[in-house]
Amino acid sequence: MPHPLIIFDLDGTLVDSYQAIQESLAFAMSTLGFTPWPLEETKRRVGRGLETLLQEAVGASHVAEGVRLFRSHYPTVYLEKSFLLPGVEETLSALREAGKILAVATNKPSDFSRDLLRHLGVARHFALVLGPLDVPRPKPHPDMIHAILATLDFSADQALYVGDMVLDSESAAAAGMEAVLVSSGGNTIEELTATGRRVIPDIRGLIPLEVTHARPAS
């Protein structure tokens, strides 16, 4: 059943920002004497927040300095090296034209998220963008989703959560809402399918699911 509110994850769902994250993480790791991960390892670990990512990369005793280093480097690369994923502009436009209210709930720091959406020309589509600094706890805790629902005056059964990782399925479950997972991020199709959620290979698959007059893709 179509939903009037659709809440999106950001990295891996709407935006490919992995190269920028990789470069800033490598800067932090190498500065602290650690060997940087390969890109594929970074992709698998992104999603649970910057502090968690740095804890996994450099250990609990270096988290604060790792976060500081990452945040000092990221502004130099994140706009240049982040891109909309294929079909995102088309999908967001179709959903908005159908009367949907759109929002973003991301574990990326919200200052970066909002600037990035503006830079990529899609900020106009979203009624609200929240990050981990806007609520007590990051995803998969439901605080961010609950805040969006309360602010925009929707119930959980009126909303759909769209993400690209198992974490996003967990976040939706914690908030008591439906989810669709797009296989464009850090988890494999098999890992996403194992959650029991609907999995689509391309974000444009949302259009026939949520816009009643759209024809399913052949």
Image (cartoon, rainbow, N blue to C red):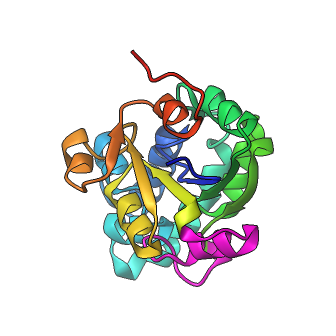
Pinpoint residue 28: horizontal percent, then vertical percent. Answer: 47, 59
| Above or below 110: residue 63 | below
Outermost residue to the top: 218
Outermost residue to the right: 124
**Quick check: is 134 in the magenta stretch?**
yes
Pinpoint residue 155: horizontal percent, then vertical percent. Answer: 61, 71
**Quick check: is 124 in the magenta stretch?**
no
90 relative to 179 in the view: left or right: right
Instruction: Give, as a single range, the part of the protein colored magenta.
Output: 133-156
Of the pair 198 and 182, the residue shown nearer to us = 198
- Name the residue: 73% across, 53% down: 114
- Name the residue: 50% across, 75% down: 142
Of the pair 43 and 136, the residue shown nearer to us = 136
Quadrant of image for the C terminus: top left
| Above or below 197: residue 66 | below
Residue 79: quarter of image: top right
| Above or below 128: residue 102 | above
Of the pair 77 and 176, the residue shown nearer to us = 176
Pinpoint residue 152: horizontal percent, then vertical percent. Answer: 74, 67
Can residue 212 be seen?
Answer: yes
Pinpoint residue 63: horizontal percent, then vertical percent. Answer: 44, 75
- Name the residue: 52% across, 55% down: 160
